[in-house]
Image: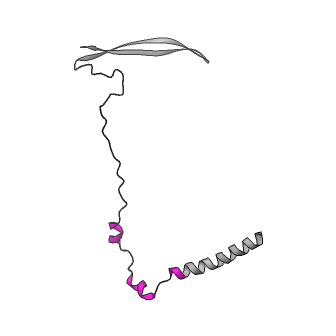
Amino acid sequence: MRIVTAAVLAALVGLLPAAVAQAQTAPSGMRTAQAAPTDSSAQQRRPAIRRVPVYPRQEWRPPVYPQYNPGPNAVRECTATYVQEYRPSGTVITPRMNCYWRRG
């Protein structure tokens, strides 16, 4: 069975290049009529520009908390402290900051 399959494949491979070569040949009159691409024709063909659609959001929300407008004269009040955090490697001291907005 393998020998027959190998023989059929060898026969197809042997015939395939001859059929491709015949399909690609053209009469000599057509070869002279076709011109080589010039620089101007190469410049005219530009790749297609890919357009990305942009859809506006329904309403804009700032990516921070609080999600309201504190007003034009708002002042940010912050308190900074150090706290102990218990980790598997041992106790460490880390800075913590709490902030809020108040009217100015």
Q: Tell whether position 27 is magenta.
A: yes
Q: Residue furthest left?
A: 72
Give the image location of residue 66, x and y in percent.
34, 20
Total marks placed: 0
Q: What residue appears at the point 31 percent right and 36 percent down from the top-left corner?
A: 57
Q: What residue appears at the point 39 percent right and 81 percent down from the top-left corner?
A: 34
Q: What residue appears at the point 46 percent right and 16 percent down from the top-left corner?
A: 95
Question: Left or right of 86: which side holds 82?
Answer: left
Above or below residue 61? Residue 75 is: above
In depth, the one of 89 and 30 nearer the eye is: 30
In depth, the one of 44 and 4 nearer the eye is: 4
Figure coloring: one colour
In depth, the one of 38 and 7 nearer the eye is: 7
The quarter of the picture where residue 18 lies is bottom right
The quarter of the picture where residue 6 lies is bottom right
In depth, the one of 57 and 4 nearer the eye is: 4
Give the image location of residue 17, x and y in percent.
60, 78
The magenta segment is 22-50
Give the image location of residue 80, x and y in percent.
40, 13
Q: Residue furthest front?
A: 1
Above or below residue 70? Residue 61 is: below
Q: What residue appears at the point 32 percent right and 44 percent down from the top-left corner?
A: 54
The quarter of the picture where residue 1 lies is bottom right
Image quarter where the C terminus lies is: top left
Above or below residue 64? Residue 82 is: above
